[in-house]
Image (spheres, rainbow, N blue to C red):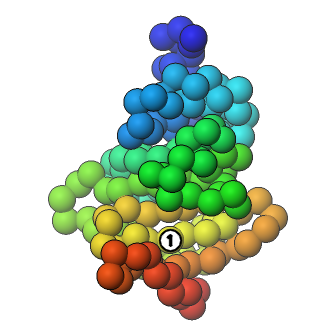
Amino acid sequence: MLNPQQLLLKLTKNVTLNQLCVTNYPEYRSVNLEYGYSMRIELKKTAIMFEYLCEMFGPLLVTSGIRCSALNEDKRVGSNSKSAHPRGEALDFKPILEGITVMQIFEQLRKNKDFLVGQVIVYADEGFIHISRFVGRSKRDFRICRLVDGKRTYEKITVA
């Protein structure tokens, strides 16, 4: 079990380990925090990306960060075996401030050629964005996900 100091471990000036290990499934919280702590070197790189996003768009709420394998494999999460979340390379977030939408953030990221990312998916109907770091695989892959008859459909978007 992690002690309070480990939970509040600052990965960057404003991002803690606890923020990047968040999950909506209480049965995984403890094991996911332990896993996140073991992956803190990779998470630090993701925290740097997240801090940059917060500087651009104001406060953002991480809704899903690193995922231990059990959490990632849980059908309720809706993930897959190729997910960057278990490697500590991705996170899902949504804006906190009123007046800032996920589509506005998505468009600004798409137009910002200097911001190297792996994948950015805006879940327009669900109100969050998935973003992964560029780590030598896909670079600047932008997609919009919409719900059609209750199923997710993805559209690849041309990068500016």
Residue neighbourhood size for the residue with mark 1, other residues' Cα within 10 Å, grouped as few (<14), some (14–19), many (≥20) = many
Decide which of 98, 23 is in the foreground and name it. Answer: 23
- Residue at figure coordinates x 51%, y 53% from the top left: 75
Residue 55 visible in the snapshot: no
Q: Where the C terminus falls, by quadrant? A: bottom right
Q: On the image, which quarter does residue 118 sit in?
A: bottom right
- Residue at figure coordinates x 32%, y 66% from the top left: 126
- Residue at figure coordinates x 26%, y 65% from the top left: 100
Whether residue 62 sits left or right of residue 59 in the image: it is right
Whether residue 6 sits left or right of residue 14 in the image: it is right
Residue 46: image x %, image y %? Answer: 62, 47
26 in relation to 106, above or below: above
Q: On the image, which quarter does residue 104 sit in?
A: bottom left
- Residue at figure coordinates x 52%, y 22% from the top left: 30
Residue 142: image x %, image y %? Answer: 56, 78
Residue 5: image x %, image y %? Answer: 52, 11
Decide which of 63, 11 is in the foreground and name it. Answer: 63
Q: Which residue is mark 1?
A: 121
Residue kind at label 1, given as amino acid type: Ile
Q: Where the N terminus falls, by quadrant? A: top right
113 in relation to 159, above or below: above
Whether residue 100 sits left or right of residue 78 in the image: it is left
